[in-house]
Every structure is written in C-alpha cells, then in structure tokens.
Image (cartoon, grey):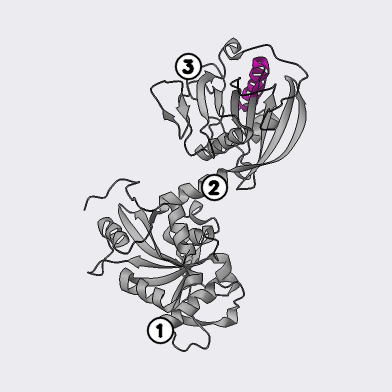
Amino acid sequence: MSVPPRGAVAGGSVAAAVAALRGGRMVLVVGDENGGYRGHLVLAAEHATAEAVNAMTTVGRGLVQVAVPSAALDRLEIPPADPTATGPGRELFRMPVGLAGEGAGVRASQRARTIRALADPASRPADFTRPGHVFPLGCAAGGVLAAPAPPEAAVDLAGLAGMAAAAALCEVCAADGELAELPELLELGRRHRLPVVSIDDIVTYRRRELARVRRCGTARIPLSAGRFRAYGFTDGLGREHIALVYGHPVSSITPLVRVHGECLFGDALGSRLCGCRTGLDHAVDRIARAGHGVLVYIRTRGGRAHGPAPSRNTETPYPATHPLEVWDLRTAFDILDELGFHEIRLLADDGQATGPGHTQRSDPHVLDIPDSASDPVRILELIPLWENASRAETGSPTPGVPGEIGRAS
C-alpha cells in the first residue's frame, strides 16, 4: 500500500491514552518505521491480568513483551539476552524471565504475575527465574525524547498515567501473521474502542510539558543600560531561565521583547565566532531606549557551548547569533505568558521572518503562537534587531527605575 504522510495517524489524544491506561485499559501505539507503520497494544504493567494478557495475544497476535527502564532491569540483575552484543540491541533485548515458584510460567495468569512483578519497585533479583516466558525490554532513560520507539513510548505513557514506569506491549499482526498495515491498525482501534496515539504525538506532548515553566524568584539588577527587574524561572528539564523586565509594561503598552539563547563563549567570554554578546548588549540597550520591554534569556541544555554561528544573510554587515530551537522558543513564550504579556513586538535577527511553530495570517505582522498555556502570545510586529533603534522607541527611557509588571507581579 502507499504509506500516508507523517501525521496521518489520527485517533485519541495522548491525554485520552493516558486516561485509558490509568483505568486499566489498553491503547494502540502507532509509529512509522522504514517507510511503513507498526502498531503495538500497550497496557500499564501494574494492570496486567490473565484476561488482559490473553486479549493481547488473541487480538495482537504478536509476542507479549514488557518495557522497563534499563536501570530497573540492571537492578534486578536481568542480563542482556546476548551478552556478546555491542549495539543498541544489547540493552534492549534482555533474558526472558519467569516468577520464582511459578513453574514453567507459560499460562496467561503466570505471565501476568511476572509482568506485575517487573513493575514492582519492591521486587528483588531472587524473585525471578532465568530463562522464563516473559520478555523484558530495556528502555532509554530519556524515554521517547532519547529513543522515539515503541518500548519508550509505552513506558512514557505509563509514567504519564501516574503508574510504575513499566508497560506490557504486543506488536499487532494481521490474520496472515505478517505485520498489520495502517488501515488494519486503525480499524482494530475502532473495532475495540482503543485510543490510538502516534509516537510522534507522544514526543510532541513530552517536549511541550518539559517546556512549561514556573516562577522561582525575583531580583533587581542594575545593568549599563538601566535598572531591570529579573524574574527567575525553571522548566521541566531543570533549566533556569531569566526574564529581564524594564520599565512598567502594562496592558496599554505592547512591550518590546528579545529572546536570547545562552551562548557560553559569546555571552561570557566575548567569542568572535558569533555575535551573541554584541546582540545581547544591543537588545538590552534597545529595550531600555524603548522605555518598556523584556529580554528573555534561555539557558541551553547541559550548558552546551556553541561553535561558529551560521550567517543568516551574507549581505548583512551585522554579526550572526545562534538560532533558538523550537522548544526553547516555546519556553520563552511560556515565560511571557506567565508574566502576563500576550501581545508583544519582537526583536528578530536580520532576515528572520516567522519563528518555528508560528502560523502567519493575512496580516504579515500578526503571528499566533499555538498551544499557549492560556491566551496566545501574539507578535504584533517583527522588528529587525540591528535596524535603526528609533523605530522601537515609543518613549523616553526612565533611568534608575526597575522593571515592574502590573498584574503579573
């Protein structure tokens, strides 16, 4: 068959899948692989029963396996199925196990008890026999963000449901024993009323949740351009971000905003491989000249040190800065939303049109930021960072006055 494009898998949302798992029901996880699609029935391991295991083998027709974080399987001393393997399969495929005292362990009830034991944090290595009839799969610590594969998707869904990080899964096969294709998978979901969710959807959901922020502190910071109020935030990755607010932005004033991604060599050491430090200083000065505005400083993952910045426009004389990742930009707009700024004028790099995730409307200066925590943050105007500063000025700066945020402070 012709394979539908990415995003063609439609069905229940991640939230619907999570709710189903929490209630002890199965869901269907679909992923695209090598130009085709694969589907897996997934059940939270804590809810494994003889009936559920039997249904998985009857409906799915594939092999029932148990996805568990690799660290948990290491703690249970369940070794790789092939100790000589050196690739990713070494961690993924583990020796099949049974539950001690269960005999052969081939019955559905026995396998269900073994699956639940693999999810139990109180289980010990001596609780399992090796080999057995339950097949553990070791999953990456970062879930689908580290490995967008069915085992990681199953474990992430179980975790999102508030269950132990372990899930039983069974690949779906067609009546002829070969892998079921996408129409068959979607029909199976409809026939058994299973929420259908794609691995891409789970990746997007997890990234979105990790991008969300919470406020953690406030301080007054005197800079060369004037006195700013700094608001600290942390996100789901534990990164700390700062919003530097100047003046008194209120609902009647559309603040001038610059989103700056951390660059260790440029910001702190003044590296000439990029224009990050120059751009940062220039943005702070532009905001102070405008009288009201915000500079959102986004920390990178793991304190990453950038190399040379790519030039956006070979004809511009201005220094290039490092582009932001889409999820860093999402974090920045969550910070603005948390501060109560829903309409902004954005200082953009030279030649930048629309940022990742924006939807441009008929008015070229009005962009929507989708999936905002509350009201969308709207960019009313894109202002080139390096153009004449007079365009961004809406009034005289107020030296010595720290940034205050009316209702959001």
Range of magenta residues: 272-293
Locate residue 365 relative to residue 266 in the image: left or right: left
Q: Choose mark 1 or mark 3, whichever is in front.
A: 1
Label whose residue precedes the other's in the sequence (1 or 3): 1
Residue pointed to by mark 2: 209
Report the residue at 51% width, 20% height from top: 381
Provide the secondary structure element on which disc 1 rests. Answer: loop
Disc 1 packing (10 Å; few <14; some 14–19; many ≥20): some
How far apart are labels 2 and 3 at the CA level? 39 Å
Up-down relation of residue 213 to residue 123 (above or below):
above
Label whose residue precedes the other's in the sequence (1 or 2): 1
Report the residue at 65% width, 23% height from top: 249
Disc 2 packing (10 Å; few <14; some 14–19; many ≥20): few
The residue under label 1 is which amino acid type?
A: Arg
Dot label at residue 315: 3
How far apart are labels 1 and 2 at the CA level? 40 Å
